[in-house]
Image (cartoon, rainbow, N blue to C red):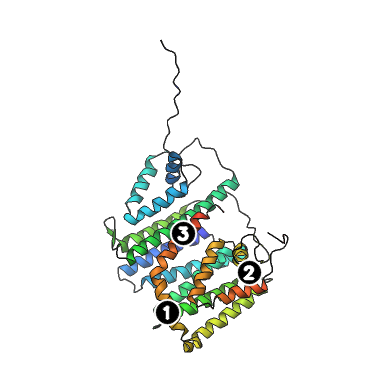
């Protein structure tokens, strides 16, 4: 499926769902809507990017898919420590991206090994790291980044703008 | 009678750009008129959205009133492709800066509007999404031909695009994204995971060789 069509359909779904939820016809939060749209956009995009060998799109749509899953999981299951899942999600998402990159080019076995290491670390971060108080420290960093993330967006935008002719 | 000839410079006409188009070519037209970079005008135009959505109305009126410049030279296939890439990066950077400022204003309590024009936000945003969706579904695919993706078969650490060990430069080249963005993502992820993510960098540094060919920079 063409990227244009996937984008168009995703926008329409976002429009319909957010319109229905704003009128209280369906009970969905903004996070739910974004999660559903991310998942809807990323599944066909991963498929087409894999068949066309477009690694940039493959990486970004894999990340979008997993972020969408995180949004839905966070919303449907009562996760008390929502900051804690950021720690786990970063490791799990990057591990999955590396595994997908290995599937795209199976000659690069290093992606598979690095991906497995990150997936194991993500599991350990859920199961073991809490004991060592790592989540508390991660929460403190999370608090800081919550205040400063607009600055991060602006800096990233300026960097892309400056390097646009590369 | 004095026969002195008066040289008249041609009157500069304001027109929409024919080649440099993101939506209707208004920003590029303004840039050509003012002899400046179209990207700068585009960023400024995006940032005006911070002051309400009226600039969209102004844009649409301008686009419908101003004709397209028919005298401009047609661009080659490769020029069109590189222009599109540049425009895409400009729009992405503009949106990032716009959202950055929007959320920064919200953090410091400056942006509290729940309405755009006279309509509530929760009506305008779905409507905008509908419009974007219909636009993407109805536009004709471009006739610029298929672009062949030339991506490296093997992953190497970059010798040319290198800040520390060339891991991010090599990985960015392999994936096909901007190396600087990848570096920022690596730094943020390493900070948020208290350095655990940095183990990936070390892993890749140890196991990836330098790119072949040139031995010294």
Please give left or right for residue A17 compared with residue B113 in the image. right
Residue B211, percent from left and from top: 69, 64
Circle 2 or circle 1, nearest the eye: 1
Q: Quadrant of the N terminus of chain A?
A: bottom right
Residue toward you, B41 or B29: B41
Q: Quadrant of the C terminus of chain A?
A: bottom right
Residue B140, percent from left and from top: 50, 51
Mark 2 vs mark 1: which is more N-terminal? 2
Residue toward you, A152 or A119: A152
Please give left or right for residue A46 compared with residue A109 in the image. left
Residue under disc 3 on the same chain as residue under disc 2 = yes
In whole angstroms, how far apart are the C-alphas of marks 3 and 2? 29 Å
Q: Residue at x 38, y 70 (%)?
A: A147
Q: Quadrant of residue A14?
A: bottom left
Residue A88, percent from left and from top: 49, 80
Which residue ends up furthest to the left in the rendered image? Answer: B118
Please give left or right for residue A110 compared with residue B47 in the image. right
Task: Determine which residue is flagged by label 1.
Answer: A139
Task: Determine which residue is flagged by label 2.
Answer: A104
Q: Is residue B143 in view from this perspective?
A: no
Q: Residue at x 44, y 20 (%)?
A: B6
In whole angstroms, how far apart are the C-alphas of marks 3 and 1? 26 Å
Mark 3 vs mark 2: which is more N-terminal? 2
Q: Vertical placement of B132 versus B4: above or below?
A: below
Tell me the SS state at disc 3.
Answer: helix
Callout 3: residue from which chain?
A
Q: How many neighbours does mark 2 have within 10 angstroms: few (below 14), some (14-19), or many (20 or more)?
A: some
Q: Vertical placement of A50 versus B62: above or below?
A: below
Circle 3 or circle 2, nearest the eye: 3
In whole angstroms, how far apart are the C-alphas of marks 2 and 1? 35 Å
């Amino acid at each position: 499926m063409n990227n244009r069509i996937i984008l168009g359909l995703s926008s329409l779904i976002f429009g319909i769902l957010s319109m229905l939820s704003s009128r209280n016809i369906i009970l969905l939060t903004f996070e739910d809507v974004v999660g559903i749209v991310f998942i809807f956009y990323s599944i066909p995009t991963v498929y087409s990017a894999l068949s066309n060998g477009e690694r940039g799109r493959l990486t970004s749509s894999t990340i979008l898919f997993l972020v969408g899953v995180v949004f839905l999981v966070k919303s449907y299951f009562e996760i008390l420590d929502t900051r804690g899942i950021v720690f786990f999600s970063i490791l799990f998402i990057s591990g999955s991206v590396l595994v997908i990159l290995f599937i795209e080019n199976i000659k690069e076995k290093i992606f598979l090994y690095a991906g497995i290491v990150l997936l194991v670390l993500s599991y350990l971060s859920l199961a073991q790291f809490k004991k060592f108080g790592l989540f508390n420290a991660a929460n403190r960093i999370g608090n800081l980044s919550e205040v400063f993330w607009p600055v991060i967006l602006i800096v990233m935008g300026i960097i892309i703008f400056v390097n646009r002719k590369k | 009678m004095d026969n002195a000839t008066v040289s008249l410079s041609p009157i500069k006409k304001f027109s929409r750009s024919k080649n440099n188009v993101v939506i209707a070519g208004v920003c590029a037209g303004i840039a050509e008129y003012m002899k400046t970079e179209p990207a700068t005008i585009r960023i400024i135009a995006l940032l005006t959205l911070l002051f309400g959505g009226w600039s969209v109305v102004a844009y649409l009126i301008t686009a419908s009133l101003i004709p397209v410049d028919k005298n401009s030279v047609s661009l080659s296939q490769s020029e069109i492709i590189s222009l599109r890439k540049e425009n895409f990066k400009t729009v992405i950077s503009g949106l990032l800066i716009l959202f950055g400022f929007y959320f920064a204003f919200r953090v410091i309590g400056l942006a509290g509007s729940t309405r755009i024009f006279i309509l509530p936000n929760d009506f305008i945003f779905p409507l905008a999404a509908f419009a974007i969706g219909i636009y993407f579904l109805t536009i004709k695919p471009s006739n610029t031909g298929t672009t062949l993706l030339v991506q490296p078969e093997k992953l190497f650490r970059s010798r040319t695009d290198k800040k520390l060990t060339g891991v991010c430069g090599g990985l960015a080249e392999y994936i096909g994204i901007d190396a600087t963005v990848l570096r920022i993502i690596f730094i943020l992820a390493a900070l948020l995971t208290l350095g655990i993510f940095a183990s990936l960098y070390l892993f890749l540094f140890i196991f990836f060789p330098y790119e072949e060919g040139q031995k010294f920079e």
